Structure formats: structure tokens, C-alpha cells
Amino acid sequence: MTNLSKSRNYDAIEALLVFAIVMIYIWRIRAAHPFFWIVPFALILASQAIHGERPSSLGFRTAGFGDCLAVFGPAFAALAITGWIAGSLLRTIRPQSAVQMLASFAVYLPWGLFQQYLMNGYFLRRLETAFSRTAAGALTSALFCAAHAPNWFLMLITAMGAPAAIWVYRRYGNLWFLGLAHTVLGFVSFMIVPDSISHHLRVGPGWYPGADLECPSCEAQSTG
């Protein structure tokens, strides 16, 4: 086995180990130690520093953002408006004031960006070094979907949305747009889908009825 092959295998093993730590955190550690997420995040940052990856190369750049808005913006706007109209007709929109809705969107925005950064800026890039583009995309999508278990609603959305986000990332390489798109879809879903279906967008143990997250910060970390 060549050194290049070993390096590629190490990248895949590293990504899968980080994912395992994330899942252990979600299911076993978060309730008692909500800030343990810093550990896997620090490992990711260290890995990217070792690989010489800069923010711009990961997708934190302005290039491509305008193109994404021009190409996908109208479709996202139509989807959001259609969903809002459906929620209005079905009377499922959450009773929030304009200020509350703006605050909810603002809080969710960095979380949506962070998820797209993890999925595309880290996991996809690592897995692409060890697998074909098709296999890496499929495995990344599967991991992202599994991270939302057991919330079947979010798993269904991520099963469809993750491959689409990966395609956009590969074509345009812009995380700012993907984070914004993730936030729009997540916010609209939160506002119009009843908790009986969405379970407040919670994942892990927090999904189960009657679950107590035990800390104010856990709910934000448990949403998809």
C-alpha cells in the first residue's frame, strides 16, 4: 500500500471516528455535559489545520454566492411561500410575533451554517479522498441522515436534502448559501409543521415524548 493510499484510508477512518464521537455525544453525553461538542469540533479544526485547509477553500467565500441566489433563490422562495400558505390553510403555524420569528431565524442561522460546514466542509471532503465521488456523496448523506435519528421527519428531509446540498457544494463551493438555504427550510419547517410530526425538530433522546433535555442549551443543539 502506497503512502497516498494510507493517507486516504486515514482520512476515512478519521471522519468515521469523529462521527462516532458526535453520535456518542448526542445519545450519551449531551444531557450531562452539553458543551462536550467542543471536543469533536476541536478535532475537526485540528485536522483541517494539519491538512492546510483555509476557510475560503472550505466554502467560506463570496464567490458563488450570487450565482446560487440567482439559480436557486426563486425556487427556495417559492417553496417557503408555498409551505407558509399550506400552514396557514391548515392552521398549523406557530403563534409567534414578528419579533419572535425574527429571533428564531437569527438563532437558527449559525446552526444551519454549522451543519452544512460539518457535512460538506469536513465529512464530504475527507470521504472523497478515500472513496469515489458517488460513494463519498452517498456515505456523507447517510451519515448526515443518521445524525438526525430517530426523528423520521428530519431523516426524510435530510435523505432528500443532503444529496442536493452536496451537489450544490461541489458545483459552487459556497457554504454561506447552503447555510442560508438550510436555515430557511429549517425555519419554515419549524414554523408550519406540528410538533406531533416534527417533535420540535429534536434528535437523539430529546425526540422521545416527555424527554427532559436538562439544560437550556441542549434544545438548540438537538435540533436538525
Image (cartoon, rainbow, N blue to C red):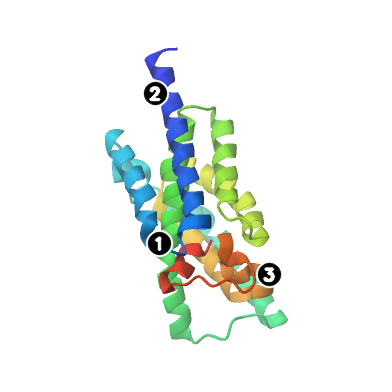
- Check if mark 2's residue and mark 1's residue have beta carbons within 8 Å: no
Badge 1: residue crowd in 10 Å (few <14, some 14–19, many ≥20)? few
Q: Is residue 87 left or right of residue 67?
A: right
Q: Is residue 60 above or below residue 195?
A: above
Tag 2: amino acid: Ser
Tag 1: amino acid: His
- Check if mark 1's residue and mark 3's residue have beta carbons within 8 Å: no
Q: On the image, numbered disc 2 is attached to which residue?
A: 7
Image quarter for residue 190? bottom right
Where the N terminus falls, by quadrant?
A: top left
Mark positioned earlier in the residue sequence (2 or 3): 2
Query: What secondary structure is found at the residue carrying circle 3?
Result: helix
Query: What secondary structure is found at the residue carrying circle 1?
Result: loop
Q: Nearer the viewer, residue 162 or 222?
A: 222
Q: Residue at x 54, y 42 (%)?
A: 167
Q: Is residue 1 above or below residue 91?
A: above
Report the mark closest to the observer, 2 or 1: 1
Q: Is residue 20 left or right of residue 59?
A: right
Marks 2 and 1, how far apart in space?
Answer: 33 Å
Residue 69 visible from this viewpoint = no
Mark positioned earlier in the residue sequence (1 or 3): 1
Mark positioned earlier in the residue sequence (2 or 1): 2
Q: Which mark is residue 197?
A: 3
- Check if mark 2's residue and mark 3's residue have beta carbons within 8 Å: no
Residue 49 visible from this viewpoint = yes
Q: On the image, numbered disc 1 is attached to which residue?
A: 33
Report the mark closest to the observer, 1 or 3: 1
Q: Is residue 135 above or below residue 98?
A: above
Marks 1 and 3, how far apart in space?
Answer: 28 Å
